[in-house]
Amino acid sequence: MSCTTVLVGRKASNDGSTMIARTDDGHFDVKKLVVVEPKKQPKKYRTILSHLEILLPDHPLRYTACPSVDPKQGVWAATGINAANVGMTATETITTNPRVLAADPLVEYKKAPSRREKDIPGGIGEEDLVVLILPYIRSAREGVLRLGTLLEQYGTYESNGIAFNDENEVWWLETIGGHHWMARRIPEEAVVINPNQFGMDGFDLKDAFGAQKANLCSADLREFIAENHLDCNQNSVFNPREIFGAHRDMDHIYNTPRAWFMGRYLTPYSHRWDGENAEFTPESDHIPWSLVPDRKVAVEDVQYLLSGHYQGTPYNPYTAQDTGKRGMYRSIGINRTGVTSICQIRPDAPEALKGLEWICFGSTTFSCWLPVYANASKMPDYLSRVTLDASTDNLFWSSRLINALADKCFAAASQDIERYQDAVNIRGRQLVREYDRIMAESGDFSRTEEANRKLCDMCREETVKTLNKVLQTASESMKNGFRLSDN
């Protein structure tokens, strides 16, 4: 799947929290937010796409997940936070060059040519990763190590980037071919931007094969690189993006412009992004993977980045100006996004309240972001009881309806959309502040479910109000409008 990822280190955020966020850009997948209790976690997991069976450890943790409502292609749990306050998002589809894939092929399912022979299972992939990893880890680093072990044992049939965060650290892992991988702890003061490409542009091999403070990788990665002549870097500079990534013409339309837009927003003063003397353009291949932002980053900044459609630039597909460049690049907020989440782990909250998940269904450009407490035994029906049929009884379909209507009358509806997003952010933050205080003072942390219900009631109220307004606006702009005075 094509997605966009943003990772925020604790010293880069305004409140000391770590954040991992990703748009899950599927094929209009219908999504929901649920809580998976330990008794519901399988003991033996079977993949749908690759026909692989994996025995799972005992004593799983409770965790949230955003699975597909239709299970025929698998779980696709996408993202979540577990009871140990560890977040995970999986996956960002990345690019890998032919040299790597020839040396370590992807592990694809192979159906037997006859009944007398056995099928050959494939590896693990995006369909499976959250279920296989998140219930069994108590830190972001543990997530990397467990995933790395599974990749080496079973392999993967696709190229992916996966993020983990806990209260102190954010880690990013990228797969390399079928069985290899590398991972970095992102700098605490940095923000990572990753748009469907092999992202890491630096890696400390000495640390990875020594103290492992901030770098981890496959045990034979150095030999793999040397034996297959993968290192194309000059002057002994180790740049993983140049070794493992792919450089395609399509990147300059589909991927690098998204990194440009996000970098431009994060560092408007310390780098030049526009004009003849720009350091980086929308089609630059060397846009940094991590940047120290010019100011601290809040949740709302991450929302803005992941809702981006090149607003404020000639590439905005919704601009009324004839710039000659409208819509030429792939936006971040797109129509087929199923769910986007920000997994935020807050250091100043009680242990039971540290994990806050900001959920956005549908196109981020037009949808709201609702915060909910991850430490709950179940999610309200407004988020979890989603059907395959359109309905205003849940946030997923209500969001999709607003998306489709507002897109057709952007100029007229944009103010209502902005007010909607602000209202849910403001009222959501107010309710979180209120329940943080109530539960901290009482010591009764079981009230997270009550808090989530109130958050959903508030969100439903604001969503219905906005749907009414946007529906009216869209109706007024229908092409078959006609009045007697038009004669």
Image (tube, grey):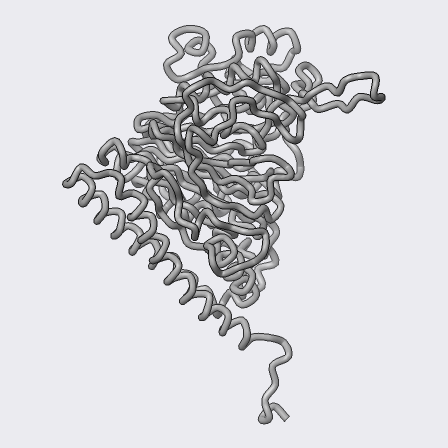
Q: Is residue 228 visible?
A: yes
Taking 441 as reference, is 110 left or right? right
| Residue 5, position as x, y percentages in the image | 48, 37
Taking 341 as reference, is 458 left or right? left
Task: Pick the quarter of the image with the C terminus.
Answer: bottom right
Farthest front residue?
39
Classify 150 as above or below 328.
above
Residue at horizontal 43%, vertical 26%?
135
| Residue 266, position as x, y percentages in the image | 39, 41
**In-front residue for pair 40/134:** 40
Classify 406 as above or below 385.
below
**In-front residue for pair 284/338:** 338
Residue at horizontal 42%, vertical 61%?
463
Residue at horizontal 24%, vertical 38%?
445
Farthest left residue?
441
| Residue 260, position as x, y percentages in the image | 50, 41
Task: Pick the quarter of the image with the N terminus.
Answer: top right
Classify 487 as above or below 337.
below
Corner quadrant of residue 49: top right
Q: What is the number of callouts on the image?
A: 0
Q: Is residue 309 visible?
A: no
Residue at horizontal 67%, vertical 25%?
51
Classify 141 as above or below 212.
below
| Residue 21, position as x, y percentages in the image | 43, 38
**In-front residue for pair 421/381:** 381
